[in-house]
Image (cartoon, helix red, strand yellow):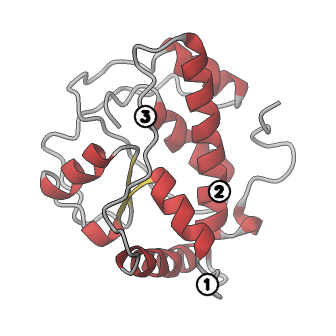
Amino acid sequence: CTGNRFRSPLAQYLTRALAPDVALETSSFGLRDVDGSPVLPEAATEAQRLRLDVSAHQARTLAGQRLEDADLVIGFERIHVATAVLDAGAAKARTFTLPELVELLEEIDAPPETDPIARAHAALVRAEWLRSHRPNPSVFPELGDPWGGPPEIFVETGARVEDLCRRLVRGLFGEEALTPEGGVPERA
């Protein structure tokens, strides 16, 4: 993320809440050095609507982090992906923008693996193969930062993060991994 105070904390906490039975280890970082800052008030509002507790979140910077061992690195913008690869050592094959990865996962055939982690690994291999064989591989769908925008842009961005995270969990782990009815509420 850029500041690690809106999009990435929502995505991190929401993804874990949507797939509570999958053993996920998640971390989120931002490009700006605002270490220790809480989520933005707009993120707290979106989190409350989604029944997520983000009160313990403190922004962390990507500077000085190493990501070469990460199974998956997700950014929202091209600059996030480039910085993760170039400065933090993330594997290019496992680094995507969130909208890009969701699109790719929806275009591939679902892997046959039943174990959610094995299925996710297989899905990522297929997604990277598809990405590398696209005619215009330099196109990266992005989700812009709402910072500095009007209140409605935060609501729209929160809704987009929610939609993308639901689709991400479905694409990586399968429909059966999604929170059962009554968990994280659908947007009204």
Q: Secondary structure at mark 3?
A: loop
Residue drawn where x is 44% and y is 37% of the image: 8
How far apart, in angstroms, are the residues tagged by discs 1 and 3?
A: 30 Å
Residue found at the very far right of the displayed protein: 181
* Displayed quadrant of residue 34: top left
How far apart, in angstroms, are the residues tagged by discs 2 and 3?
A: 18 Å
Label ID, residue 167: 2
Residue found at the very far bottom of the displayed protein: 112
**Left or right, residue 112 beside residue 72:** right
Residue drawn where x is 62% and y is 67% of the image: 171
Q: Secondary structure at mark 2?
A: helix
* Displayed quadrant of residue 71: bottom left
Image location of residue 114, percent across then percent down: 67, 83
> Which residue carries the number 3 mark?
144
Three-letter amino acid code at the position of disc 3: Gly
Q: Residues within 10 Å of mark 2 (few under 14, many from 20)?
A: many
Disc nearer the start of the sequence (1/3): 1
Label ID, residue 146: none
Disc nearer the start of the sequence (2/1): 1
Three-letter amino acid code at the position of disc 2: Arg
Three-letter amino acid code at the position of disc 1: Pro
Disc nearer the start of the sequence (2/3): 3
Query: Closest to the observer: 25 or 98?
Result: 98
* Displayed quadrant of residue 22: bottom right
Image location of residue 69, percent across then percent down: 26, 66
> Which residue carries the number 1 mark?
111
Image location of residue 104, percent across then percent down: 52, 68
